[in-house]
Image (spheres, helix red, strand yellow):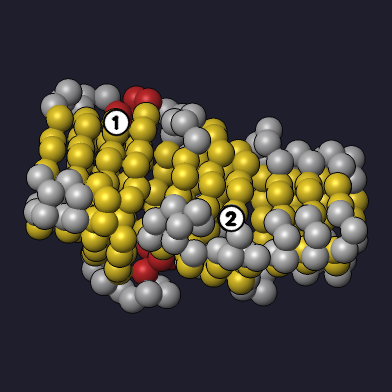
Amino acid sequence: MWKIYNDIDSKIECAGGGKVWIGTDAETGSINSAPKVELKDRSGVFGNIHTGDSVYTEDTYSVSGEIIENHILTSTELPNTVIEKNETEFSGIPHDDLTYPSDDNIEDLMPGKYWNVTIGDRSEVTFYSGTYYFNNLNLGMDTKVMIDESEGPVFIYVLNDIHWKCSEMTHTSGPMRGPGEFFLGYLGTRDIFLSYAFSGTFAAPYTMLSIGQAEKEFKGSFIADRIEVHQDAEIRHVKFRYPFGLDL
């Protein structure tokens, strides 16, 4: 099974064209969704379901609040776009490829604009407070990632392609506060398979986000056009601490 451990006021919000899918034995808070909502067997919603489409349910499910279908959702019920597809932010990036070898310890990847960056297998890399822009970002197998939020939040934006295969991820501000200070935004349309260690906010509003095929424990917030969470995965909700016009 998989579960979303929520703060009292946490919720699922979807303004995209996909759907909200709550898997077998899953538990979550209130749902506001423009597309349809599917509740699989033994799933639970602690709160209300408001959808602009319909609600599909299997034999056994529970909803503690009201279910309203074909509902016209207001701007207060659906979030603003978390990241807009604005390629002008990526202008001026030198078309240079940076490749770091396997088993390397990288300490100088500072905030800025990069084209294609590949971190070799079993390497260690630190991202520092500030904003990063990548055309492509490829973290090799068993990469160790440190997020250094000592001077403020860390933002990473990827335009075209991302591979995130880190085996260990740590935060200088701690395992619970840290995920609320790291934001990764993917603006591409390739389906994302988040099967390795991740803690923070992952936003992929134009594609599918698949969570928990290998790694099973996650902390943070996850936003996508559609989301699949695999069996036995556990997600502990941690809000991003900085405003986007959206309370995650």
Mark 1: amino acid? Asn
Mark 2: amino acid? His
Q: Where is mark 2, residue-wise?
A: 230
Q: CA distance from mark 2 to mark 1?
A: 28 Å
Reply above or below: 41 against 203: below
Which image quarter holds the C terminus? bottom right
Residue 8, visible in the rendered structure: yes
Q: Where is mark 1, residue-wise?
A: 135
Indicate the position of residue 163 as horizontal and vertical percent values. Answer: 34, 42
**For mark 1, does the 10 Å Cα neighbourhood hold few (<14), some (14 to 19), or many (20 or more) residues?**
many
Q: Which residue does the image show at 22% across and 32% down from the upper left?
A: 116
Q: Which residue does the image show at 29% across and 33% down from the upper left?
A: 136
Q: Which residue does the image show at 13% across and 27% down from the upper left?
A: 96
Indicate the position of residue 155 as horizontal and vertical percent values. Answer: 34, 50
Indicate the position of residue 59 as horizontal and vertical percent values. Answer: 90, 58
Is 223 on the left-hand or right-hand side of 48?
left
**For mark 2, does the 10 Å Cα neighbourhood hold few (<14), some (14 to 19), or many (20 or more) residues?**
many
Reply above or below: 10 against 101: below
